[in-house]
Amino acid sequence: MVQSAIVVALVYWFINVLDQSFLSWQCLSRPIVVAPVVGLLLGDFHTGILMGASLEAIFMGISAIGGSIPADPLSATCISVAYSILTGADAETGIALALPIGTLMSSWNAMLTPIFASLAPYWENLCQKNIKAFTVQTLLFTTFVQPLVNTVVLFIAVAYGIEGLNAALAVLPAWVMTGLGAASSMMTAVGFAILVSMIWSNEVGIFFFVGYVLSSVTGLDSLKVAIIAAAIAITMFFGEKRHIDTKNAMANSSAATAVNDEEDFF
Amino acid sequence: MEKKQVTQEERKVLKSMFLRSHLVFTTFNMVKMEANAYTLTMAPAIESIYKDDPEEKREAYLRANQFFNTHAVPFSFIAGLNYAMEKQHHDNGSIDGTTINAIKTALMGPTAGMFDSLFFNCLRIIASGIAIGLCSQGNVLGTFLFILIYGVSQSVVKYLFVNWGYTFGTSFIDAVYNSGLMQALTKAAGVMGLMMIGFMTASTVNVPLNWTISIGETSVVVQDVLNSIFPGILGVGLLFLMVGAIKKGWRPTQLVLCILAFGLVGAFLGIF
């Protein structure tokens, strides 16, 4: 079991890194791609392909939006394909096994999210001081540090079962988890606050609240809010244009009169 | 608008930006989301524009490293456009930093919605459908077709977009600047940028208060009371509290640590 756990964890890690740096998000990490790869590595390519089809059909409608993943298709695929090939179980058994592991991974992740978020000011400073160091460090971080916890959790869960990991989580008081979760859902406000303080002007600042109300009260999605925003912005642009044109026309005519005055004078 | 000739150096920069634009989720975090990936993508442009101006370069990196979040494909269009804007900013000062930030911010919301529906919710389903059919017969061609239809297509569009964003941005800003309308554009971009941040604040920032005050027999859910005053008042309050702190000279590190402490202390006291 330990040997296959290593394979599963390594594939998980490798695909995780590759998905973030090659082609596009959620392309190489889909079951239809991952399952044949796991199958090939565990010596049963054919089963991998067949399971890829059935797992993709199951996970096709599940999308990860806003960072909350109902069931992580990548880890579920790694686990269920490995189990099927090694124990002869069918895809459903594998997924049933993968679901608690997925939940466990997101609990461990929930602890790290605010800690990774706390690094944002460090990155902001580093990219201004030394872009080479920034490049190297962000790439190393995203390759080795960010997927590390998930990979280790996956390895332990497949190799030794999930009891130990659950016990380790249970040691933490409940308020620590709640607090970290609350902190990470408030963290984005820091990013927005920096951005708002950079583009705020008293003249148009009130439009922040227009956008806010459109979302929080009417629940419109981004594209619809953007259309309303564009309509206001374009109206404003042409209003301003007319103002500038009039100003220029007036400046021109007064310049012309000034010239005439001079001619009269001489 | 006339089409601008792209020089050898610009072509090199755009190619490098295209390759780097694949790193969309590098060090994705809750504070600035894709900001680091955006900085990595903008780095070739910034290095080539501000070669001999360390102070301006520092400011350009600070602009690049702000909150950013959109779909991977328009990501490269906005980066290409931003390259054009940074170049104009340096060459003739036609566009200021605030406008660059505002345009960038205005674009990320709508493009995210549009391209998520287009690629993730539409093209991916088509690609999966074809691939599942083939793979269920044991044909690995399905997997390769999936990568081709859903993955390679996005890469190709990204390549076109980064170049298109650059040429479009250059001619657009030239046209606006030459007709003396930059002031109008600044204002319009500010309106749209702020509206989109307002929208994103409402949909992203969440103060998960879970606090019930019991007074005798009745109990009051604080979150509900506050939301009945104005929906999501806590999120917007938190945001402006921090804008105020930044104006007073607080550093982002302090803000992040305060939030972390606030979350933990709040949870310990039982209000979350």
Image (cartoon, coloured by chain):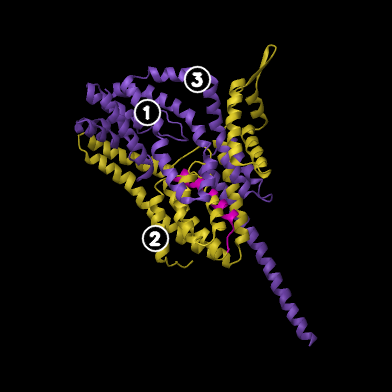
Crowding near the residue tagged with mark 1, few <14, some 14–19, many ≥20 C-alpha atoms within 10 Å: some
- Please provide the residue range marked out in magenta: B93-115
Disc 1 marks which amino acid?
Val
Q: Which mark is residue B12?
A: 2
Tell whether position A133 is magenta: no
Residue A172 — which label? 3
Across and down, in percent, residue B142 comes to: 24, 40
Residue A211 appearing in the image: no
Front position in the image: B234 or A111: A111
Q: Amino acid at mark 3?
A: Leu
**Does dot 2 land on a helix, a strand or a loop?**
helix
**Secondary element at image label 3:** loop
Are labels 1 and 2 assigned to the same chain?
no
Q: Colour of chain B?
A: yellow
- Mark 1, chain letter? A
Q: CA distance from mark 3 to mark 1?
A: 19 Å
Q: Horizontal and vertical percent for residue B179?
A: 59, 67
Quarter of the picture holding the C terminus of chain B: top right
Q: CA distance from mark 1 to mark 2?
A: 40 Å
Q: Would residue B27 appear left or right of A94 to someone viewing this image?
A: right
Residue A199 relative to residue A117: left or right: right
Asked whether residue A99 appears in the rendered view, the answer is yes
A217 sits left or right of B164 in the view: right
Image point 80% across, 85% down: which residue? A265
Q: Colour of chain A?
A: purple
Relative to the observer, which residue lies in front, B12 or B82? B12
Q: Nearest the camera: B24 or A126?
A: A126
Q: CA distance from mark 2 to mark 3?
A: 52 Å
The residue under the point 39% across, 18% down is A164
